[in-house]
Image: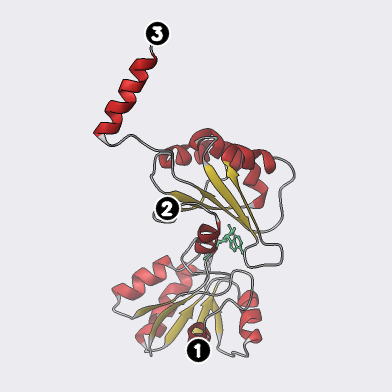
Amino acid sequence: APGLYVVATPIGNLGDITVRALETLSAADLVACEDTRVTRVLLDRYAIRTKLVAYHEHNAARMRPRLLEDLAEGRSIALVSDAGTPLISDPGYRLVVDAAAAGHRVVPIPGASALLSALVTAGLPTDAFLFAGFLAPKSAARRRRLAELARTPATLVFYESPRRLGECLADMAETLGADRQAAVARELTKLHETVVRGPLSELAAAFAGDPPRGEIVIAVGPPGEIAADPDDVDRLLAEALARLP
Ligand code: SAM
């Protein structure tokens, strides 16, 4: 059926693709992808011969009107990114906005994303979480953003480049709190998959040396108990007063 299909692809292990994603990629008139070489490997693996077109940061403004025209002519487009779920720190947001505004069907074909795989293995609360994507590469801007997030009562999930992992964890320990529980998930679903869990100060120390290889997600647990209940405030106050000389 015509429409824009937002199709999740694997984040490492090529087996992590749904039956419905494969059917959608086969049936589509066009697969819009970030890098045709990367997506070709996936499609070849499943003997899918749908035409590929590149849709990425640098040609999006030029390509979007053409893709919208295809949709208007009744074609079906499968949007994929190099890995995981499109639009999650990947292209596609404007295309979805414009396709929906033009009255086209926008259909999710869910599957892998590093965000959820990291969250569910981090050993941190999952009832509320905030995905903060990539932090700024420079420390000052990164710290400003971390300071804004510091009191958010939710697990925080970040994507980070291995080159900056050490300095990023050090900034986190300082701005979010050295004792805050966190996890570094590396190479999820791949051969060298590892998840290291511990307080931010320990993780910062563990990754202070040579940068690790591979792809990384950092998850940080929510801040410690905040005395929100008035009874708690009274009790804490009484305890504090009792300690005064
Ligand atoms: N759209 C993708 C998704 O749904 O997860 C994310 C794309 S973003 C450009 C790439 C970043 O995702 C990497 O720098 C890394 O932080 C994270 N990532 C992707 N694959 C990963 C994996 N297998 N293990 C750990 N992190 C991964």
Which residue is the site of mark 2?
130
Q: CA distance from mark 3 to mark 1?
A: 73 Å
Pick the front one: 172 or 224:
224
Pick the front one: 87 or 186:
186
Identify which amino acid the numbered label 3 is placed on. Answer: Pro
Q: Residue at x 39, y 38 (%)?
A: 225
The image position of residue 87, as x and y in percent, is 46, 66
Query: Looking at the image, do the residues carrying marks 1 and 2 touch, with CB atoms under 8 Å apart?
Result: no
- Quadrant location of the C terminus? top left
Q: Residue at x 48, y 69 (%)?
A: 86
Which one is closest to the eye, mark 3 or mark 1?
Answer: 3
Give the number of the disc on residue 174: none
Identify which amino acid the numbered label 1 is placed on. Answer: Glu
Point out the residue furthest to the left here. 230
Give the number of the disc on residue 23: 1
Which residue is the site of mark 3?
245
Q: Residue at x 36, y 36 (%)?
A: 226
